[in-house]
Image: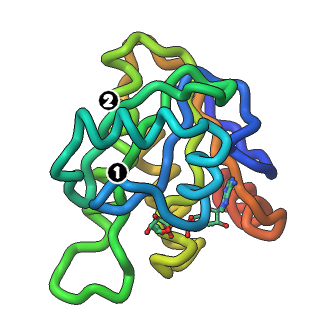
Amino acid sequence: MLNIEITVGDITKVNVDAIVNAANTALRGGGGVDGAIHRAAGGQLIYELIERYPDGMHVGDAVVTFGYELPAMYVIHTVGPHYMNVGIDHEALLESCYRRCLEEADKLGLHSIAFPAISTGVYLYPLRDATRVALRTIREFEPESLERAELVFFKSEDAEIARELMNY
Ligand code: AR6
């Protein structure tokens, strides 16, 4: 089972093998954590995305690029569900984001991964519900190489909620 840590801070500064980006289906950058990751990684990141993923990606999936100027060697880009979109299974899609990122990291033989709170910003997924999905999916995952998953929260009050949920 993976070791889960909850921390507060900026994910672009975290020293792990891969950080996860909460991207959008176009995969061409954006605001929030996506914007911060692109700024910190430098301009090469967008070129790799354009070259390797010209058609973008689907909600709930994950794709990998290098991290360039980030401390992390890789960025795993995923797209969470927008909570205001109707006719989709938000929970299943969010679960798929976490699972697919873990699978990609494991496939690369990585030991550590850091997640932001996918979908809980601009995409409006309630933090408590989203964190429950994150914790459950990470706990259920059976890793080959991965040892540690860090949940990085930008706001300390969000990390407090996550710590509370960890104890259930
Ligand atoms: N480090 C860690 N967490 C962060 C950081 C950071 N540097 N910056 C923000 N957060 P959001 P989404 C937290 O909106 O809801 C983008 O424009 C933030 O507090 O970044 O999945 C994309 O291009 C929140 O809890 O992602 C998409 O269009 C969490 O990261 C769209 O936003 C996620 O907030 C995706 O929306």
Q: Quadrant of ligand 1?
A: bottom right
* Residue identified by numbered label 2: 103
**Where in the figure is residue 126, as x and y percent of width and height?**
53, 79
**Residue under the image location 23 percent in, 52 percent down:** 56
Location of residue 105 (image quadrant):
top left
Q: What amino acid type should be assigned to the residue bearing mark 1?
A: Cys
Q: Is residue 7 above or below residue 113?
A: below
**Residue under the image location 49 percent in, 60 percent down:** 118
Location of residue 142 (image quadrant):
top left
* In-image side of 56 versus 9 (left or right): left
Q: Is residue 75 above or below residue 159?
A: above
Mark 1 to mark 2 CA distance (whole Å): 10 Å
In this view, the residue in front, 71 or 81, is: 71
* Residue identified by numbered label 1: 97
Residue count near mark 1 (Cα–Cα under 10 Å), binned few <14, some 14–19, many ≥20 = many
**Residue under the image location 28 percent in, 61 percent down:** 25
**Where in the figure is residue 104, as x and y percent of width and height?**
33, 28
**Residue under the image location 49 percent in, 48 percent down:** 21
Q: Earlier in the sequence, mark 1 or mark 2?
A: 1
* In-image side of 55 versus 69 (left or right): left
Q: What amino acid type should be assigned to the residue bearing mark 2?
A: Glu
Q: Secondary structure at mark 2?
A: helix
Q: Is residue 88 visible?
A: yes
